[in-house]
Image (spheres, grey):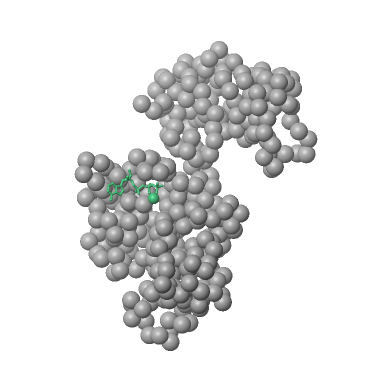
Amino acid sequence: MTFLHLEGLSKRYDDFVAVNGLSLDVERGEFVSLLGPSGCGKTTTLQMIAGFVTPNAGRIALNGRDITQLAPEKRGMGVVFQSYALFAHMTVADNVGFGLEMRRVPRAQRVGRIREALALVRLEGLDKRYPRELSGGQRQRVAIARALVIQPDVLLLDEPMSNLDAKLREEMHIELRAIQRKLRITTILVTHDQVEAMTMSDRIAVMHAGRIVQVASPLDAYERPESPFASTFLGRTNAFEGTVLERKPNCCVVQVGSRQLHVRHEGREFGRDVHVYVRPEKLRLAHNGTGDTLPGRVRTRVFLGSHWMLEVDSALGVFRISQPNTGEPPPPEGESVHVEWSDDDLRILTMEA
Ligand SMILES: Nc1ncnc2c1ncn2[C@@H]1O[C@H](COP(=O)(O)OP(=O)(O)OP(=O)(O)O)[C@@H](O)[C@H]1O
Ligand SMILES: [Mg+2]
């Protein structure tokens, strides 16, 4: 049975619709991310789940029980807010223990549970410090410990790693995912960081303008985006406008500029005007053209450590190409090359109005 069930949730602020008929089912123990650009309604959705914002329409059920009207503190959810909102005048231990005190957990038990929660986020020994005496990353961990200590049925995280530097953020992704797996807590993470969503989630719900436009595993969302928005928001892509010439059961012939491309797809209907997409890492550079290749010239070449990013001018437009770093540099700027791909890596989507 679905553990957390969101059905047709909407939230209006005056004339502005922040969340628009949003539905989502989350299984017990699952980690789901709400991923989308700033202002698309992620925080509003999370706050409705937490009970701090009342929906104008729709229903929320937890473990089969309707909780749409239930007070936040009765929902059994641990929340880490976008601005992690620690109490400045309280020590780390008191911050973490706050929820337990509210729930009238006896002092003796509180001490043990606070210790456990701090150990979980690796903050042992910092219990007597005040928030101002901690680094940003440590504060963020206190906020996570504070949410975990009440042993919530659902953990709600709103951009909990937004203030960390890139390396610490990467470490926290892995740590937090390990904690979540160990405790098997049903978790909803709000983020606009696609790498964060990909690393941590069982499924990603891609949001756009108050709606969920796709729910899929990270790999499926990346490999088979269902809308131009999802394909460009999740990772980088090359997009070319084209016109469908012929439709076969598993393949479309699409005229793109002067070329006819054969795009494999799974038999879904598309209009005549389409975009053909191909990810930068699915393209290769060749010195001589064979098969599906296109002559071009390297416009820019940037070294990124693990890989190179190139822009190649061609008759179809500019291709962004990502090449793994093999130790040998790829062709330099100005050099003539061929861009190569396999038809399996082309995707097709109807242009968005
Ligand atoms: N209390 C409010 N009153 C009026 N408008 C609001 C209110 N809260 C949010 N909004 C609007 O609703 C929209 C969605 O806001 P929300 O905070 O859910 O976005 P978000 O996806 O979390 O964005 P971000 O990534 O920037 O945090 C925004 O356009 C915002 O301005
Ligand atoms: Mg937000």
Left or right of 170? Residue 130 is left
The quarter of the rendered structure image containing the N terminus is bottom left
The quarter of the rendered structure image containing the C terminus is top left
Judged from this view, the residue extending furthest toward the top is: 258
Rendered location of residue 318, percent (x, y):
58, 23
> Image point 63% across, 27% down: which residue?
311
Rendered location of residue 18, percent (x, y):
30, 44
> Image point 70% across, 24% down: which residue?
333
Task: Kindly tell me whether residue 114 is visible in this rendering.
Answer: yes
> Image point 46% across, 82% down: which residue?
111
The residue closer to the viewer here, 171 or 257, is 171
Left or right of 32? Residue 8 is left
> Image point 33% across, 76% down: which residue?
102
The residue closer to the viewer here, 344 or 186, is 186
Q: Quadrant of residue 64?
A: bottom left
Q: In the rendered view, would you say 348 is above or below 145?
A: above
Q: Quadrant of residue 328?
A: top right
Left or right of 309? Residue 61 is left
Rendered location of residue 286, percent (x, y):
72, 25
Task: Kindly tell me whether residue 252 is visible in this rendering.
Answer: no
Q: In the rendered view, would you say 216 is above or below 181?
A: above
The tally of labels here is 0
Judged from this view, the residue extending furthest toward the bottom is: 108
Left or right of 102? Residue 279 is right
